[in-house]
Image: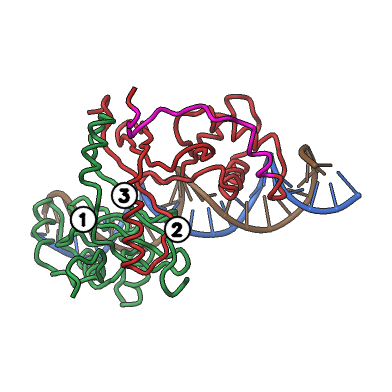
Chain colours: A green, B red, C brown, D blue
Amino acid sequence: MVVSSIFESRRIAVSGLGFKKSLKAAGRRVTRTRQAVLSLLERTAQPLSATEIFDQLQQEKVSIDLVTVYRTVHVLKELGLVAQIELHQEGQARFELKEGREHHHHIRCQMCGAIVDLLLCPLKKLTKLIESQTQYIVDDHTLEFTGLCPKCQ
Amino acid sequence: MVVSSIFESRRIAVSGLGFKKSLKAAGRRVTRTRQAVLSLLERTAQPLSATEIFDQLQQEKVSIDLVTVYRTVHVLKELGLVAQIELHQEGQARFELKEGREHHHHIRCQMCGAIVDLLLCPLKKLTKLIESQTQYIVDDHTLEFTGLCPKCQ
DNA sequence: CTCTATGCAAATAATTTGCAAGCAC
DNA sequence: GTGCTTGCAAATTATTTGCATAGAG
């Protein structure tokens, strides 16, 4: 087992523990649809787009509107439970669980779309440097790679 | 003068030299609109969105259609003259001249939108590491920062 | 029962496509 | 003159908003 691997396959998140508290603390309600979206994100190996969440839940016979998916991921993002990522020129946002996960980045195959997590972030020192030289206060960053996955080469 | 500064103000590009050759080599024509878009990008201190290019050219009494702006930046991108960048959750693409410029990244103020170029890229070694560990062939990456500029803090 | 959440319709916003007319070479 | 370009209209895609109703606490 390579401990220092920079990538990982997704692990199963520990569902239903923190999110009810988070919702209630924010005066929001624990609903069937929110649980369904969270549950799906937990079970999924890739960050999902709103449409993918919608389609997948439809297949699972969970009745939900696309608009509700958008609203749900926004709430979950506000609460810090979900991260919104923008992959290289993909033209749509994707969402993944933050709960229990390290800050990380992604690489996406431009041919088939396969996404692998990159368990690293070389940007802590760089952030300091940028702050001192630009006078900006850095709040966040995006770092995403594109390329060809082994199958598509 | 700080030589090793990681950021820079835009310099004026040397217009009209390479782009005609590039266009012709690709069997494309040197048109008034393409020259207008290139000229604008050269004169501008920030990467511009399609709408911004359109609006600015309108102000300069250059008659051009928004659709043509989109088609133009795509052609210029194909030819390698222009780079398309996606700033953190901004929801639109921006374009900047590549000609004569080093590979670089950006930081954008989430309050006022001010964008500063970051003349650095710490990712060459990292790219090798990612390639060896993921088996992907890395083609490109995006690295963009958001935060608050000095004025907005 | 009160207030948040959801569904449905419709509005926006960014970008793309089809087609006939315009212009570069 | 031939074929790439452009303008205009319209289609697409991603996302957001308004409003009346359903549902959580």
Does residue B108 lie above or below C17 as drawn? above
Mark 1 residue type: His
Q: How far across and down, in percent of the image, does residue D22 sit?
A: 25, 65
Q: Secondary structure at mark 3?
A: strand
Q: How far across and down, in percent of the image, does residue B138 sit?
A: 41, 60
Q: How far across and down, in percent of the image, does residue A86 sit?
A: 36, 54
Residue D8 figure quarter: top right
Q: CA distance from mark 1 to mark 3?
A: 11 Å
Residue at 71% x, 37% y: name it: B31
Does the stretch in magenta take in B21? yes
Q: Which residue is mark 3?
A: A142
Dot label at residue B139: 2
What range is drawn magenta here?
Answer: B3-23
Q: Which residue is mark 1?
A: A103
Residue at 35% x, 47% y: name it: B143
Callout 3 crowding tier (Cα within 10 Å): few <14, some 14–19, many ≥20: many
